Amino acid sequence: MNNPYVTIVIPCYNEEDVLEDTLQQLGQLLENMIEDSMVAPASDLLFVDDGSKDNTWDILEMSKYSFVKGLKLTRNSGHQNALYAGLMAAKDQADCVISIDADLQDDINAIPKMIEKYMLGNEIVYGVRSKRDTDTFFKRTTALGFYRFMNKIGIDLVENHADFRLMSSRALHELSNYKEQNLFLRGLVPLIGLPSSTVAYERKERKAGESKYPLKKMLSFAFDGITSFSVAPIRLVTMIGLLSVILSSAAGLYALTQKFLGHTESGWTSLIISIWLIGGLQLLGIGLLGEYIGKIFTEVKRRPKYAIEIDKYTKKNTVFPSV
Ligand code: UDP
Ligand code: MG
């Protein structure tokens, strides 16, 4: 195999604080890889500006590297959609694509290792965090709990893998056949089932700027992941409902016998408790059903996941001017 045309896709949302540093580091790395003939000279960096409200796009335009390219989305579409926009743009052009976050929390030195594994015949190479010391205790424990839970309910996630991965053009074409609206890439990619491998790296701290994943977004991301992939939660509610019906019938039977035997119970406490319990269960069940109906609602609309305002990647002569 010849050295591959590699596109590195970087979704960016309001990343002006880190972007110059990121450009510098990734630019240097790509330059070295081209020099060492590890990758084809046409290889490039594709920044996807996810509707940033700061100077993200201007910084990209001022880059000194001619291999810096960009896609500007019309509005903020979310990390997963922005990443997907980049992947879909690159799938017909590059031999393989590596996705990485703009804050470079993921170690860019893992990139050459990913390419080596790709050259050995892997269509997907997952970056896996070997250490999460730099994440807060809270983020670490919730993440661990999340992976465990997901695996328990039958969703195979690669543990400690986020969206730092290499995918071949073939794998990307397979990915494009998954037509769902609610993207949860780290759950979808393992479903493709092509030969894959992992590369371990240490995750660093975000250098500047803020995490775009505050607790609220993290929770909704986790919930999306679960409800997009599994009906296990609904089944669980059904089981709990069934169990509570059996238990309350037994309790009812007991109360009736007591009554016939003449030991009448005052009954108030048990009544109140069961009303609350059943009421709660019903609400839980309805809520969960609502989640899935909501998913159906968004799926049937088949809205586009993103729209591209400016394409400086797939069209000719559209690289940013050098300064
Ligand atoms: N991001 C994006 N659109 C969004 C939110 C985030 O493109 O609506 C990008 C962001 O610029 C970064 C990546 O997604 O490159 C991951 O975000 P972040 O680093 O804030 O997440 P964390 O590492 O805290 O999970
Ligand atoms: Mg980050």
Image (cartoon, rainbow, N blue to C red):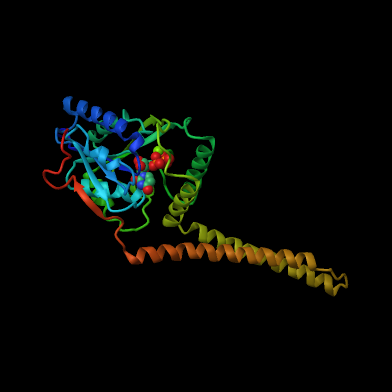
Marks counted in the figure total 0
Residue 104 lies, with reference to residue 279, above or below; the image says above
Foreground residue among 45 and 52: 52
Quarter of the picture for ligand 1? top left
Q: Position of residue 51 (x, y in %)?
A: 31, 49
| Residue 49, quarter of the rendered image | top left
Q: Position of residue 308 (x, y in %)?
A: 24, 53
On screen, residue 253 versus residue 100, left or right, reads right
On screen, residue 183 versus residue 267, left or right, reads left
On screen, residue 114 versus residue 142, left or right, reads left
| Residue 61, quarter of the rendered image | top left
Residue 144 lies, with reference to residue 290, above or below; the image says above
Image quarter in which the N terminus is found: top left
| Residue drawn at (44%, 54%) of the image | 224
Kindly tell me whether residue 142 is visible in this rendering: yes
Residue 290 lies, with reference to residue 319, above or below; the image says below
In the image, farthest residue toward the left: 317
Q: Where is residue 108 in the image (x, y as percent from the top left)?
A: 32, 30
Image quarter in which the C terminus is found: top left
Kindly tell me whether residue 161 is visible in this rendering: no
On screen, residue 142 versus residue 163, left or right, reads right
Residue 86 lies, with reference to residue 205, above or below; the image says below
Foreground residue among 90 and 160: 90
Q: Where is residue 71 in the image (x, y as percent from the top left)?
A: 24, 46
In the image, farthest residue toward the right: 262
